Image (cartoon, grey):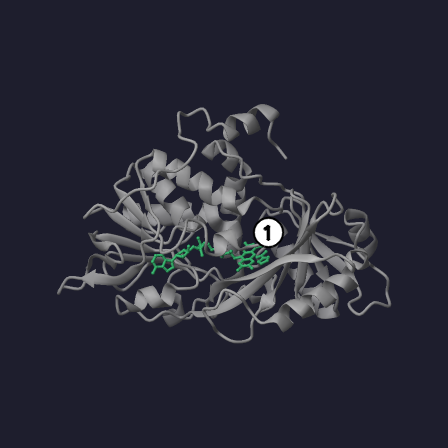
Amino acid sequence: MRHSLFSIVRNAIGGNRGWPAQWREAAPKPEYDIVIVGAGGHGLATAYYLAREHGISNIAVLEKGWLGGGNTGRNTTIIRSNYLWEESQKLYEHALKLWETLSQELNYNVMYSPRGVMMLAHTVHDVQSAQRHIHANRLGGIDNEWITPEQAKAFCPLLNIEANIRYPILGAALQRRGGVARHDAVAWGYARGASALGVDIIQNCEVTGIDRAPSGEVTGVQTTRGAIRARRIGVVAAGHTSVLMAMAGVRMPLESYPLQALVSEPVKPIMSCVVMSNTVHAYMSQSDKGELVIGAGTDAYTSYSQTGALHISAHTLDAICELFPAVRRMRMLRNWGGIVDVTPDRSPIIGKTPVPGLYVNCGWGTGGFKATPGSGHVFAHTLATGAPHKFNAPFTLDRFRSGRLIDEAAAAAVAH
Ligand code: FAD
Ligand code: PYC
């Protein structure tokens, strides 16, 4: 951790910018400059940067449930920027750089911990794919290195590198600047920062309709707490984007799938890095509370259920026990799912839509937590100026018409 005892105490008592300890729960007003649908990390970060960098604070962030209760509070918090294509590298590296100073920026300890993310290779195909990513990353100025099984074992002593196991380890790609953060704190930190700058955060307020003028542009939203007028609307509702966009008559190239994770009973520190294996659909790290944080692959079928099929988790636990035999007798405390929306090229969509005034930020699939600060930052720019930031310019909705796809299927790091 890069935080002094002073900064931890200062954050715990509410910071030194005169910010309140918490965000302010607001009642909806009849009209705002901008309405953001979804109070996950991305929506809240968008509101924060709109207020902080663009001076626009007449904003409502509308959340159908509770703040951070979607994927932001359900994910396994892996942060990395080792993507294949230049477009993605720039976007995720932009986010990674923001992570590095986010606790200071928000004056709230988001517990960003760059402890290293190691991605295992079990087959010749894995080796080739990992090395291709490493070369591409290094050309793009992003750290990523190939390590041998012995070096992987030295980095993560819990790992079984014997040659006769079901998923033998042939080597690994290691991004040392990758790591984890505390997901709740990210939502709370952005919420507190945005709220202090005048943004209204409104929970238990589901958007049920998007209003448009006869000439086509958006005029506001219908919600379970009444109608709200706004000439700019940003939909940031992971998993449910298609449902919302259909309210404005826009069909999205998205499918929604459950993705699951589990945590074990807490134990003393046994693992100081993140280990992922795409091929066997399993990855693990240890939280500061001591729980082993374990992630599985997506379900095979589309669904809006925040659970997921049990056989997917069972398969993941099989693999975890093979890779880390020392944890075989540990008990699992909790298992849950989140709904991720996935694009055909496994890259996000951030920008304008065919409906004037309607903007969308979605399609992060299994990997948007790491992007939270960067996504909010570039989306705020787009909403404020009506033009893309240089880092989200390639991530248009139109690419599914033009064919300029950004195929990151192999970088997704989770089976899907
Ligand atoms: P969310 O946090 O889901 O926020 C969207 C919000 O919109 C929700 O709170 C929802 O209630 C709200 N909403 C929906 N419909 C409406 C409506 N009609 N009206 C009002 N509000 C609405 N990514 C990584 O980078 N690293 C990981 O290790 C990682 N692990 C993951 C593990 C799991 C199990 C899951 C499920 C996801 C994981 N992800 C990971 C992906 C990551 O969690 C998401 O991409 C990211 O959190 C999306 O953030 P968000 O703010 O866009 O969405
Ligand atoms: O994108 O690194 C990732 C990830 C890990 C688990 C789910 N997504």
What residue lies at 31% left-to-right and 38% top-to-bottom?
Answer: 54
Give the image location of residue 386, x and y in percent. Answer: 28, 50
Quadrant holding the C terminus: bottom right
Q: Pick the residue in front: 75 or 344.
A: 75
- For the question of whether residue 42 can be seen, the reply is yes
Q: Is residue 398 above or below residue 289?
A: below
Q: Residue furthest bottom?
A: 301
Q: Pick the residue in front: 153 or 183.
A: 183
Q: CB at mark 1 closer than 8 A to ligand 1?
A: yes
Asked which secondary structure carries label 1, the reply is loop
What residue lies at 42% left-to-right and 58% top-to-bottom?
Answer: 394
Q: What type is the residue that disc 1 sits on?
A: Ile
According to the picture, the residue beneath numbered tag 1 turns out to be 78
The answer to which quarter of the image holds residue 84 is: bottom right
Give the image location of residue 287, x and y in percent. Answer: 65, 46
What residue lies at 20% left-to-right and 61% top-to-bottom?
Answer: 211
Give the image location of residue 285, x and y in percent. Answer: 67, 51
Dot 1 crowding, Cα within 10 Å, few <14, some 14–19, many 20+: many
What residue lies at 25% left-to-right and 41% top-to-bottom?
Answer: 58
- For the question of whether residue 117 can be seen, the reply is no
The quadrant of the picture showing ligand 2 is: bottom right
